[in-house]
Image (cartoon, rainbow, N blue to C red):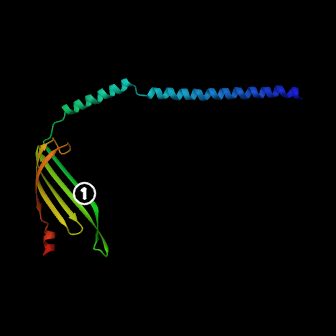
């Protein structure tokens, strides 16, 4: 009986090893195909240099086909919650208020005018009007040095509240 089992075990072992070898070869083929697919979509140095040259040419075209505008306008708004904690020695009082600021500015080359309005829930309102002279820099978006002379405009609501 053992002489009969040996060839059966040998056949089972042979089929098992051959199946494992085919499975190993299948995994290898899958990995190779995946790497070939990645290689087709990979950037080379030549591709990168060509893309860089195309972008440079687009920048040249844009610079040639646009004109500088000497006028510059901006508008903005800031808002936030302010919290103040006061301590008189015996009690601590927390107060909070909502504040908003509105900005508007207009420049013609290096000369500009700007305004700011502050609106606060604690009946504090303020506004200012400013004359601006840009000493260095080409625009507000670039680095600049601006000389500013301003005037604070009293709030009517605040003025009436003081009386």
Judged from this view, the residue extending furthest toward the right is 1
Q: Is residue 104 left or right of residue 93?
A: left
Residue 90 at x, y percent in the picture = 31, 76
Residue 146 against residue 159 in the figure, above or below:
above
Q: Nearer the viewer, residue 62 or 8?
A: 8
Q: Nearer the viewer, residue 100 or 82?
A: 82
**Residue in view at x 22 percent, y 54 percent:** 76
Q: Is residue 30 left or right of residue 43?
A: right
**Residue in view at x 19 percent, y 61 percent:** 118
Residue 38 against residue 161 in the figure, above or below:
above
Q: Which residue is disc 1 drawn over?
A: 78
Q: Quadrant of the C terminus?
A: bottom left
Residue 6 against residue 137 in the figure, above or below:
above
Judged from this view, the residue extending furthest toward the front is 89
Q: Give SS at disc 1.
A: strand
State the count of labels.
1
Q: In which quarter of the image is residue 46?
A: top left
Residue 64 at x, y percent in the picture = 19, 31
Residue 70 at x, y percent in the picture = 12, 42
Residue 146 at x, y percent in the picture = 13, 47
Q: In which quarter of the image is residue 102?
A: bottom left
**Residue in view at x 28 percent, y 60 percent:** 80
Q: Quadrant of the N terminus?
A: top right
Q: Quadrant of residue 69?
A: top left
**Residue in view at x 52 percent, y 29 percent:** 34
Neighbor class of circle 1 (other Cα within 10 Å; few <14, some 14-19, many 20+) is: few
């Amino acid at each position: 009986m053992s002489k009969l089992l040996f060839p059966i075990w040998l056949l089972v072992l042979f089929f098992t090893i051959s199946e494992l070898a085919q499975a190993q070869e299948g995994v290898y083929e899958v990995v190779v195909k995946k790497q070939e697919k990645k290689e087709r979509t990979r950037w080379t140095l030549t591709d990168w240099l060509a893309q860089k040259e195309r972008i440079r040419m687009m920048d040249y075209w844009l610079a040639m086909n646009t004109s500088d505008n000497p006028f510059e306008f901006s508008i903005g708004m800031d808002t936030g919650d302010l919290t103040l904690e006061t301590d008189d020695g015996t009690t601590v009082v927390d107060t909070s208020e909502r504040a908003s600021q509105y900005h508007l500015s207009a420049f013609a080359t290096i000369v500009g005018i700007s305004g700011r309005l502050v609106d606060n829930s604690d009946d504090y309102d303020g506004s200012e009007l400013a004359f601006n002279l840009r000493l260095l820099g080409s625009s507000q978006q670039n680095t600049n040095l601006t000389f500013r002379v301003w005037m604070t405009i009293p709030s009517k609501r605040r003025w009436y509240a003081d009386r």
